[in-house]
Image (cartoon, rainbow, N blue to C red):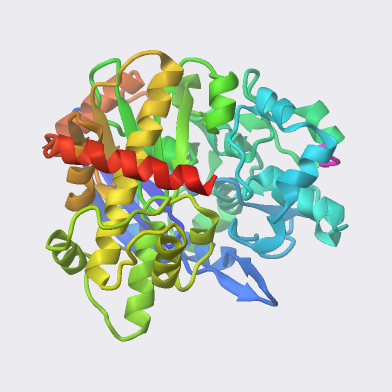
Amino acid sequence: MLKLLAFDYGASSGRGILGKFDGSRLEIEEVHRFANEPVTVNGHLYWDILRLYHELKQGIHKCTVNGHKDIGSIGIDTWGVDFGLLDSEGNLLGNPFHYRDIRTEGMIGEAAKLVSKRSIYEETGIAFQKFNTLYQLLSMSLRGSPLLEKASTMLFIPDLLNYFLTGEKASEYTIASTAQMLDSRKGQWAGDMLKKLGIPQGILANIIKPGAQLGKLSTMVSTELGMGRVPVMAVAEHDTGSAVVSVPASQDRYAYISSGTWSLLGVEAAAPVINDDTYRLNYTNEGGFNNSIRLLKNIMGLWIYQECKRAWDKEGESTSFDQLEQEASKSTAFLSFIDPDDDMFYNPGGMPGKIREYCSKTGQRVPETRAEIVRCIMESLALKYKMALYGLENILGYTLPVLHIVGGGCKNVMLSQFTANAIDRPVITGPTEATAVGNLVAQLVALGEVGSLAEGREVVRNSFPCRAYAPADVRQWDEAYGRFISIIDKQY
């Protein structure tokens, strides 16, 4: 029985998952779970990176004391774009900024003064999001940040955690591709573009492909944790990249959603798709496992729902997600809609009020109860998925007959059924621990335990149950989509 250890860091929590592989099936066991709570200091938002590293070591230590010293390898995946800076001696220069920090406001416009937006997109193929690494670094450069001046190396969050474990510095391809700083066709840093934008290229680490062995636990870490010098693998370190590895598809044509705080709806492509349509519709071309491209649309996902629950809990109206969805199922259908990607929903705080404000200013009935707000969110997300799927099919020139949803959002039965209704095609959900499972599958491929990604997906199908949702009430959802589109069009 081969044992592997996957660490999956999300925007609000992290987990260490032990994988056990018998040659055909993969079993998973959560060995450590921890909160990932950003910290606000002097008006800026940061990640508590040393706490996150401490929790990583705690997860490894728990394996040691619970009889799992015989780990075959370790892999780490996290969210994209954020990074830490190291000085010339390898010391960390401050806590990494959170992608929702305000410092990137207006930076897309500043970049466009130096290099046209079309030129940036033609080279990188990455959708314009104000949190992209490119705009974080541009903000630091324009403000004369002393941290940037002293920096010798920039490492993305999973690369930074790998460095803490092994002492090795590298940038894994899938996580680097989120930065909007790679030449998407060559898979290397876009040097000329970065030079024009004043981004120091000397801080950029060499890019390695997922499936490579990055290094081994350093002697110091190995001694501290009572674990041997276990290999640390460069998996698909972007959490969406790992989630896509776990999609249990067997057919050639399908779409996927990696569903969580964000919803990433896309397909796997053999090469970047960069044209007038992808530029106009702001689709992105991120790196994937096995030199693939994740052509996808970034949608605001369950963040809005999570923020509403956080607000209600804070007001003393604490309840479970299941109870909220039960209440919403009894509420009036198609009362009002929001555009989940509107800027007003981007920052934390006061989310129920923001939803009411959006509905009011768009001339809709304002949802008052928790049930009405939750139903508004779920219906709006399903309709936004339909819009993104139609855009993707228009780009590709063919129909995508089935949609796979993987990740924590699979647990949301209401949203899964609403999505099937909205898109009028089957939805298959699972696995729920998609990023950790994909992380483990990548390790299996890297170790030669499975021969290919296709074989890895067969392991997923053998190991984890899926649930199918058939479309219902399609006519009503088509009518609702017309209203939804008209509301969004008014906003833009």
Total label count?
0
> What x and y, as percent, mark residue 179?
63, 40
Whether residue 31 sits left or right of residue 425 in the image: it is right
Q: Quadrant of residue 178?
A: top right
Whether residue 177 sits left or right of residue 19 in the image: it is right
**Quarter occupied by the N terminus:** top left
Which is the main secondary structure of the residues drawn in magenta?
loop
> What x and y, as percent, mark residue 290?
46, 21
Q: Quadrant of residue 251?
A: top left
Q: Is residue 181 above or below residue 374?
A: above
- The residue at 66%/28% (across/down) is 121
> What x and y, as percent, mark residue 76?
46, 46
Tell me the magenta residue range. 197-202
- The residue at 28%/53% (across/down) is 378
> What x and y, as percent, mark residue 21?
24, 36
- The residue at 43%/40% (across/down) is 240
- The residue at 41%/47% (across/down) is 487
**Which residue is at the front of the view, 87 or 408?**
408
Q: Is residue 16 above or below residue 492?
A: below
**Which residue is at the front of the view, 447 or 286?**
286
Whether residue 212 sits left or right of residue 69 in the image: it is right
**Which residue is at the front of the view, 301 or 76?**
301
Q: Quadrant of residue 113?
A: top right
Residue 249 included in the magenta stretch of the image: no
**Quarter occupied by the C terminus:** top right
Report if residue 443 is visible in the image.
no
Report if residue 12 is visible in the image.
yes
Q: Residue furthest front?
A: 363
Q: Residue furthest bottom?
A: 316
